[in-house]
Amino acid sequence: MLNKKTVEDIDVRGKRVLVRCDFNVPLDENRNITDDTRIVGALPTIEYLIKNGAKVILCSHMGKPKGEPKPELSLAPVAKALSEKLGKAVIFAADDCVVGENAKKAVSEMADGDVVLLENTRYRAEETKNIDDFSKELASLAEIFVNDAFGTAHRAHCSNVGVTKYLPVAVCGYLIQKEIQFLGNAVNNPVRPLVAILGGSKVSSKISVINNLLEKVDTLIIGGGMAYTFMKAQGLSVGTSLLEEDFIEYASDMMKKAEEKGVKLLIPVDTVEASEYSNDAEIKIAEGGIDDGFMGLDIGPKSIELFKDALKDAKTVVWNGPMGVFEMPNFAKGTNAIAAALAELDATTVIGGGDSVAAVNKAGLADKMTHISTGGGASLEFLEGKELPGIVAINDK
Ligand code: ADP
Ligand code: MG
């Protein structure tokens, strides 16, 4: 499946290697890192490069500084955390222009196995527009490019795509390799039955994945905020629930398509409805449609049973999007029940989407899943069958 070159396919000894990582970690108001999953995820590639005598130059974006230096989005805290994890000094090149005097000096003084971290690539306005001058500057620091940032692979930016124009040897790191393997196999070469579960609130950006998934899956389960557009398409009332008016017809088309293809498409048969968006709201279980003045905030108990039953023989499951507003305890049952059901399965389970991953972590079940994807948007576009520019730019084997 993986036809892209990885760090193991090239000789890195003594070479200056620019590595695009995903160090976009959450910070608290004192700029402490509150979740270091992404730093930990980047370690295998960095450690491999150190061990094999490369000069390792790391870069990443953090947040949205919108093309100018924002001290609160500096990668300085990442350099510190990374030093601790690697057990060796990480030189932080604190240039507001990312590739400035500090970076050039630090790189020129590197010995084999040294590590330098550049400043937030989005301090530069060119980065997200993929404008050549910044790509060229980044490339000038190195001889080889490694992309290990899956989270931005669906975007063509200087630091993951533009740079490969000037550094033709471009390979992927272990993180991207793993993502391509698990996500790729799950949708393109799955052990069947393959079940996909979709939910969450970003309905308009997610709903178009359904068309592609119906070509691949045996069963498609729809919960979360996406379900009400389907309920509406079935002629049911949805009260004040999330609804994408513009996609009601699409939802009907998808139900028709599922029927034609013999794909089982399941939507909730009951809903936990609330008088307002609050954990303290008046709560009822609604069968079928939602009552006037109420909004659906979780799937109901019968839906949980229906979905669990559809999952019990699954051999591959892809899950993107919580079943309800799991952040509020009264609306977390559906999401937790699905997470628990997946944890029990003897199947390949792949979880994508920032909030879905958070829900699985919160339930303490992350280590029971086969693969937790690091890129929400990227994993979704992968499931949509789109080519990701950040992966296209990597050398083929
Ligand atoms: P992910 O990050 O996993 O891709 P999304 O960002 O699309 O998922 O959606 C996550 C959010 O969806 C959560 O914050 C959750 O509260 C919300 N959500 C789930 N079900 C509903 C619902 N019925 N109504 C409103 N919001 C919902
Ligand atoms: Mg989200």
Image: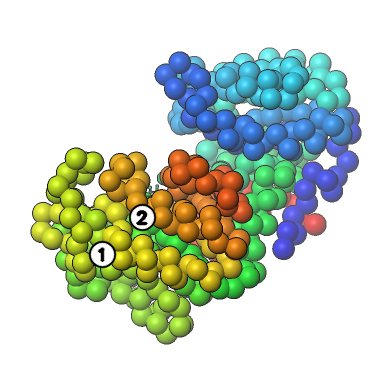
Residue 74: x and y, percent? 54, 21
Q: Label 1 to label 2, Cα distance in Å?
A: 11 Å
Q: Is residue 247 among what the camera can see?
A: no
| Position of the C terminus by quadrant | bottom right
Q: Residue furthest left?
A: 292
Residue in view at x 59 percent, y 18 percent: 76
Q: Which colouring convention does the figure follow?
A: rainbow
Drawn side of residue 293 relative to residue 323, left or right: left
Secondary structure under tag 1 reads strand
- Crowding near the residue tagged with mark 1, few <14, some 14–19, many ≥20 C-alpha atoms within 10 Å: many
- Up the image or down, 311 lies above or below 321; here it is below
Residue 293: x and y, percent? 11, 54
Residue 302: x and y, percent? 31, 66
Residue in view at x 60 percent, y 23 percent: 78
- Crowding near the residue tagged with mark 2, few <14, some 14–19, many ≥20 C-alpha atoms within 10 Å: many
Q: Amino acid at mark 2?
A: Gly
| Position of the N terminus by quadrant | bottom right
Name the residue tied to disc 1. 270
Q: Nearer the viewer, residue 74 or 229?
A: 229
Name the residue tied to disc 2. 334
Secondary structure under tag 2 reads helix
Residue in view at x 73 percent, y 59 percent: 2
- Up the image or down, 396 lies above or below 329; here it is below
Residue in view at x 73 percent, y 25 percent: 86
Q: Amino acid at mark 1?
A: Asp
Q: Point out the quarter of the image occupied by ligand 2.
A: top left
Query: Which label's residue is closer to the chain start, 1 or 2?
Result: 1
